[in-house]
Structure formats: structure tokens, C-alpha cells
Amino acid sequence: MRWRRFKSVLGARDREFVRDRSALAWNIAFPLLIIIGFAYAFTGNQLEHYKVGIIGPSEESLVAFFDIKYLKLIEIKGPDLAKEIEISINKVQRHQLDMLINTQLKQYWVNDSSPSGVMLEKVLSGSGGVDYQKQSVKNEQVRYVDWLIPGVLGMNMMFSALFGVGYVIVRYRKNGVLKRLQATPLSALEFLSAQIVSRLWLIMAITIIVYIGCQLLIGFAMYGNYLNLLLVYTLGAFAMISMGLIVAARVRSEEMAGGLLNMLSWPMMFLSGVWFSLEGLHPWVQKLALIFPLTHITEAARVIMIDGAGLIDIWPNLMALIAMSIIFLLMGVTLFRWE
Amino acid sequence: MQPIIQVEQLIKQFNGVKAVKGVSFEVGEGTCLGLLGPNGAGKTTTVEMMEGIKRPDNGSILYRGEKLGKEFQRQAGIMFQTTALQDFISVREALDLFSSFYPQSGDLQQIIEDCSLAAFLHQDTSKLSGGQRQRLLLAIALVNKPDVLFLDEPTTGLDPQARHNFWQLIHKIKQQNKTIVLTTHYMEEAYELCDRIIIMDHGEIIAQGTPKALLAEHFNDIVIQIPNSSALESLLGSTPDHAGLDITRHQQGVDICTSDINLTVQQLLAANVSLNGMQIRERNLDDLFLELTGKALRQ
């Protein structure tokens, strides 16, 4: 591999992308618009619903409490109840549950910084729960937008990686750019490496711009380490660029490439937990989602940003992304044809 | 002359249809070889196999006695029939990009001058005119100081001025003793530029040699061109065999092919056909091409 040739192709591809003003603007504007749109759509009172987790059987003394119209009762159970309780307390901390009640131990948990929690506490004491012991938790509220941003950033990377590499290489093949390059000493490895690196750094630059833009415009939670987050997004972008290479390897028609890329991106968009949690979906669907790089990017980025998770917590996601990158890259490079 | 390229029994088929059926020829160093043929004759497929772009199903191509490889790739300059460049790239950037692919490169400033590109160096390549674009593609084919240059229909779609300008460029390149393999539909172009021509049809070589030798081999007559007149019409109408003359009609009049010009002129005068506007021309490559490949429209 000749460094000079690689650098030339890399520079040419970068210039092509940066000079295509409309595509560049769209790459930045699209995720911003989505995040701002959803942030507004899911703020306000329209989804207000008091969510109360219940550990143990319903108690007759609390019938009046349980009968409150806007109360959604969520039964906490499972083979490892202690673990489930721990998760539920965490959810109270993050305002995913407004209150948690253990009817056996006559205990309840609320977050003192949550208006809903404080109000439910008053209602509980006036509805037969006066003898229940309060267990306080405190934490910053996790808004929907905080939950959404890690996935939307990943989703934007997905579109940019798949279409920016897959579609572009197919276009090069169709209009004869690849044929002309084939007639030079440039090797396929040099050409593909330049495409990957060019797209990778462009994706990362755009993701950082969008991240800062969102932080300035609407602000969101980030409790983890920035380097860990950068690692997740870089590995994720690499895995999805490599996935785009498989589509680009031999396809000659842009329509065919568009169809294949949509076939990959749409299931990922809806089944990778970007818009809604995969909890509650059929277990088979949850398993299926694990084959998508976007699922691992979203999961890992979300726990870093919301929970401040470290590398040890996300290593299964990192391993999955590394394995996918290697497999996709080998397939893409092996299958690649200039014509 | 020492052959720089030797093509032996080249065969290529696509989906069971043979596009090239065992062609063999040589290209002498420092010469210009023209590959002519109707659409679908197999000339572009042959050239692309010679360029190393397509792999032959059978046969061999030797460059300086060796199989095509890295050395050939470094020493070949290629201008395809249709070439796209990346979007949003200027003329200068395109030249620099392709130049960087080769360990050796020509004098870019000289190439820019020769190809008259200095005025467009910073222009986006997508905004060039047809002639400017072809000159850029030729310049790109020259960036590695190639010993052998492949030009696949380089002047198709150009206006006469641009075409003549392009021919001048090729003449300059020929003076540098470079070997050129040219495919074209324009017989005038082949006659102007090529030292030897090969005419292909249905994937086979049907004639090869110098243009003059081929014309001499296939024709021993000349063409008398007579403009339309009433006497000419009456001559054509009165005798079903056109008085034994080899006549081809066209919009402006008729072409009469004859090996005895005196006799034909006497016949015309005897039939009261006016010779005003009469022209006499030698046979050319157009005649040869149509003679060998027929006049019927190809599908």
C-alpha cells in the first residue's frame, strides 16, 4: 500500500464531500431537526402519567391509592427479585418511575427532586399508606430527549456511513470513475481504505458538531467519559462504513444499492432502540436487534451518557462492534470489484 | 519494426455471445494503430483487454514480450470512451490526483500547455465543454509519461474545430515516438492519424494494413460525382442497368465508380448528361469500410 496514493484519494474524497454544500448541510441539519422536533413533541403534560412500581401483593389498605385514575401500576417481579428491586430503585432515581412501593416491607421510594414523586407521597399517606417508611433517592431527571440523543446521533452516523460509502461507490462504478481508477496502479485496498478513513473522520466531525449544537440548543445529560463515548461512536461508525462496503462491493445500479441500503437501515432504525426501548418486545425481536451495529452503539452510548457507565460496563457492545467491523470489512474487501 | 504489443488468439464472450473471436495482431513501437469497425464489432472489448481492464477468456497479450502486469500499468496511458471524474474536482486537482498514482510522472506544466488547459485549471471538471473535457482526459492519460497510449473514440461528439484541435494534439504526441492504439468511427480521423488500421466486424479482423495498402488492395477505380440534372434522371430512368455504370444515388446526385474514366465520361456525354459540377475523387476509407462491413444499418 502506497501512502501517497492513499492520501491523494482521501483528499479527493474529502473535497468532494465538503464542496457538496447541500449534502453537508443536510448531514448536520437532519439530526438537529429530529432531536429538536422530538424534544418538543415529548415535553409538556400530554404524556403525564404517574408510574408506580409495586413489589409484593396488592394490599387492601392501599385500594384507594391504587384506584387513582392516572396511576399506572407496574408489577416488579422476576426470578432475581433483589436485582429487579435494585433496577427499579435506579429507575426512580432517573425518574423513569415516579414511586416504588414494597407492600411486604411497607416501604416506598421517591425522588425528592421529582414533583410527581412528592405529590404521590402525599396521596399515599392520605390513602392508607400512612405507616409506610420512606426511602429517599435523589438524582437528576432523565428526560426523553436525554434518552433519545445517543440513539439519534448513532442513527445519523448509520445513514451517513451506509449511503456515504455504499451509495457513492456504486455511483462511481456506474458512471465509470472506478473503471478509470482501475486503469492506474491504485490498488483496491488503497482506494477502499481512503473511502473508509474519509467517511470515518467526516462522520466523527459532523457528530461532534451535532453533539455540541444539541448541547447548546437544548442541553442533555452526559455523566460519562467523553473518550469512552468517542470510542463507541468511532467503532460504531467503522462497523457501519464496513457494512456499506458490502453493499458497494459489486452492485452496479444506484436503484439496487438504494433498495439494499434501505433494507439495512430501516430495520436498524426501528429495532435498535433508537426511538423506544426494546423492553417489552418479543424476545426473538430483542435477540434479532443484537445483530445490528446500531443497537450496540445506542446501548453503549446511552449508558455512558445517562448512567456514566465505564468501559467495563460496555465491553460486550464494544466486542460486538469490533467483531462486526472485522467481518464486514473482510467481506467488503474480498467481494469488491472495480466493475 | 519491433512490436511493443503482441495480441494472440484473443477470445472474449459475454453471456454466451462471443464478442471477440480469436483476433491476433501486433502493434509496432512508435506507431499509431487504428481499430475500426461498426458498433458491436468488438473493438472496444479488444482494446479493454489490451488495457488490462477486461480479462480475456482465451488468448494472450504481451507487452514488450511480457504478460500485462504492474510494469505495463505504469507505462500505459488510457483514455476511455466514456470517463467520469469525481464530482467537485478542478482540472488541476484531477491532474494532481492521477499523477500521484504513478511512481514517475510527466512534466505537468508541459502537459497542461500541450493540451491547452491553462485557462481552465481551477474550473470544476463538470463545467468543461466537450472539447475541453476530452483534452483534460487526454492530459490525464499522459500524466505518467506513457510509452503506449490507448484512445477509445476520443473525438466522438466533438465539433469539427475541437476534433481538428484534438488531431493536432495526437500528432504532437506521435512526434514523441509514443505508441498509440486508437479506436474510432471516423474514417477521416483514422486516415489522418493511423499508420496501420485494423477493421473488425462481428468480433473478427476482416482487414488490416496501412490505409494506402488496404485501399490499393480493395479498389482499382475512382469515383466520379455528378450533381442532379434532368438528363441524369432520364439516363437513370431509361436504362434499368444504368447503362452498365456502377452508380450509387444520394441526395445531391450520383457517385459513379469506374476504372476507365475516359469511357465513363464519353458515356455520360453521349447521354447528354451535363458534366458541370462534376468531381473526381479517389477511393477513401469510408468506401473501404462500407465495402467490407456492408451498408445495412446495424441493430
Image (spheres, rainbow, N blue to C red):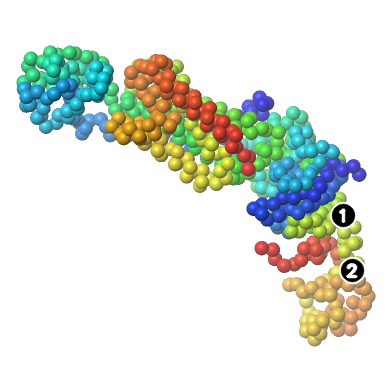
Q: Secondary structure at mark 2?
A: loop
Q: Position of residue B271 (x, y in %)?
A: 86, 84
Q: Position of residue A190 (x, y in %)?
A: 63, 30
Tell which of B201 and B102 is nearer to you.
B201
The number of discs equals: 2
Q: Amino acid at mark 1?
A: Gly
Q: Position of residue A308 (x, y in %)?
A: 35, 16
Tell which of B278 and A64 is nearer to you.
A64
Chain label for disc 2:
B
Instruction: Give the residue at x 71% y 54%.
Output: B19
As drawn, A306 above or below B11? above
Q: Residue placed farthest to the bottom in the image?
A: B238
For marks 2 and 1, give the CA distance: 19 Å
Image quadrant occupied by the N terminus of chain A: top right
Q: Is residue A25 visible?
A: no
* Residue B191 appears left or right of A161: right
- Which corner quadrant of the image does residue B239 belong to? bottom right
Look at mark 1 in the image and give the residue it sits on: B209
Look at mark 2 in the image and give the residue it sits on: B221
Crowdedness of circle 1 by 10 Å Cα count: few (<14), some, many (20+)?
A: some
Instruction: Give the residue at x 81% y 75%.
Output: B247
Tell which of A132 and A82 is nearer to you.
A82
* Residue B69 appears left or right of B210: left
Crowdedness of circle 2 by 10 Å Cα count: few (<14), some, many (20+)?
A: some
